[in-house]
Amino acid sequence: MSGTSGNRQNGARDRDSEGRARNARPRDGLGRPLPYGADGVERQPEGVVRDPERTVTEAQALLDAGRPFHAHEVFEDAWKSGPEDERMLWRGLAQLAVGLTHAARGNTTGGSRLLRRGAGAVDEWRAGDTGRPRPYGLDLTELTSWARELATVAERDGAAVSAGAWAPRLRGSTR
């Protein structure tokens, strides 16, 4: 894995090129660590500054591929690098993606809590006086409805959901 040195196999801690601790273990499509040497999915690079259009497009492609953990990382980059007045929006979207991740992993309680928290953050951002009902084409009303529906289904059924089947349409049915 580029940018890392050492691993847990030899007792050393995984570090990136700046010396920060980073887990270099391969990950599955839902972001769960796999044993060293296992085939995993390519990880999203961290700290990438994307314009909002690219953020939404990349996140949607990852969601469609059943990889909400990786979509969460794309939204997290936007949350951390975007304008202050949009941070709650991007944070809420990241929480929606990680909520789907947990629901797909079978952590239905944690997933439903994150889905509701993310929907609340998106609603709070939308309630602010932004004058932007569909920022970057995002259908925020449909997204928060989707999140609350999935939270209810996860709680009711108590079983893992299919990340691909439950992937939201970020721009609604018109994307």
Image (cartoon, rainbow, N blue to C red):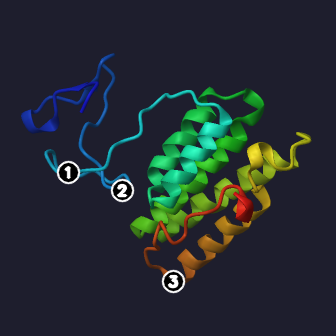
Q: Earlier in the sequence, mark 2 or mark 1?
A: 2
- Give whichever of 49, 174 is nearer the camera: 174
Vertical placement of 81 versus 96: above or below? above
Q: Residue at x 92, y 41 (%)?
A: 131
Picture disc at residue 47: none
Q: Is residue 33 above or below residue 106?
A: above
Disc 1 residue type (three-letter) = Asp
Residue 110, percent from left and from top: 50, 63
As measured in the structure, the alpha-carbon distance from the residue carrying label 2 to the one carrying label 1 is 11 Å
- Comes first in the chain, label 3 or label 1: 1
Residue at numbered disc 3: 157
Disc 2 + disc 1, Cβ < 8 Å: no
Among the 4 quarters of the image, the one containing residue 119: bottom right
Of callouts 2 and 3, which one flags the residue occurring earlier in the amino acid sequence?
Answer: 2
Crowding around mark 3 (Cα neighbors within 10 Å: few <14, some 14 to 19, many 20+) is: few
* Mark 2 residue element: loop
Q: Which residue position holds label 1?
A: 39
Tell me the residue at 51%/48% (across/down).
71
Give SS at disc 3.
helix
Image x and y of residue 48, in percent: 51, 28
Amino acid on which disc 2 is placed? Gly
| Quadrant in the picture for residue 54 | top right
Query: Which residue is at 51% across, 72% downward?
Result: 165
- Spatial CA span between label 3 and label 1: 31 Å
> Where in the figure is residue 114, as x and y percent of width and height?
58, 58
How many marks are shown on the rendered structure?
A: 3
Quarter of the view holding residue 171: bottom right
Residue holding disc 2: 29
